[in-house]
Amino acid sequence: MEIESGSIESGLAESESAVPEAGPEEARERYPHPTSAARSANMKGNRRADTKPELALRRALHGRGYRYRKDYRLDLDGGVRVRPDIVFTARRVAVFVDGCFWHCCPEHGSKPAANTWYWEPKLRRNVERDRAADAALGRAGWTVIRLWEHESLEMAVAAVVQAVRSPSEHSAVITG
């Protein structure tokens, strides 16, 4: 296999000892090539934090006088790390604003038609990771609120305010 200078493969070839050489089928399974330049630009525009629904919720909560941490990493027992979108540390309330595509919303989640070999397992792992994070936070005594990006701002604010004002003795997972 001939490697061009300055290509991604050339950088990988220099560190061959760290990563075993993979055939074309194994390389294909790691990450799909974008179907178009427009799709590539669209996917690059997706943010991990500070999404529009998350910003709207934070603005509304802040305007009502609530103070919180954003994108705050929680190190739980057993080495579990969770990074909720909004965290009320004193009240032990963790809020997640989930995107319909990325977290497989039953109402609006869509299944990609291209590169299904990559997307189906990835989206399934996202949901499994969400459930594992909910369980870990629950065991640690946190109240977890999961909101979908399509839910109304008023409903989202009401759910968060209720959880923060009336902390339960037992942890709970509240979904919108």
Image (cartoon, grey):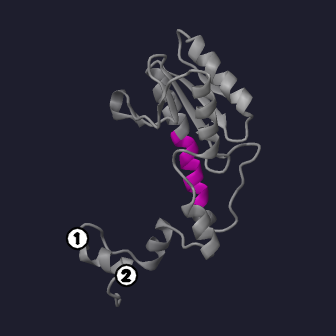
Question: Separation of disc 2 and disc 1 at Cα?
Answer: 18 Å
Q: Count numbered badges in the picture.
A: 2
Q: Is residue 140 above or below residue 168?
A: below
Q: Position of residue 29 (x, y in %)?
A: 49, 68
Q: Secondary structure at mark 2?
A: loop
Which amino acid, by three-letter code, is at mark 1?
A: Ser
**Callout 2–callout 1 Cβ contact below 8 Å:** no
Q: Is residue 176 visible?
A: no
Asked if one can make out residue 84 in the rendered structure from this viewpoint, the answer is yes
In which quarter of the view is residue 55 placed? top right
* Residue 7, numbered label: 2
Q: State the mark number for residue 17.
A: 1
> What type of secondary structure mainly makes up the magenta span?
helix
Q: Residues within 10 Å of mark 2 (few under 14, many from 20)?
A: few
Indicate left or right for 89 with 1 as reference.
right
Question: Could you tell me residue 18's position as x and y percent?
Answer: 25, 66
Q: Quadrant of the image for the C terminus?
A: top right
Which residues lie in the magenta part? 119-129
Query: How far across and how far down the image is residue 154, in percent?
Result: 73, 28
Query: Going by the picture, which residue comes out furthest to the right?
Result: 107
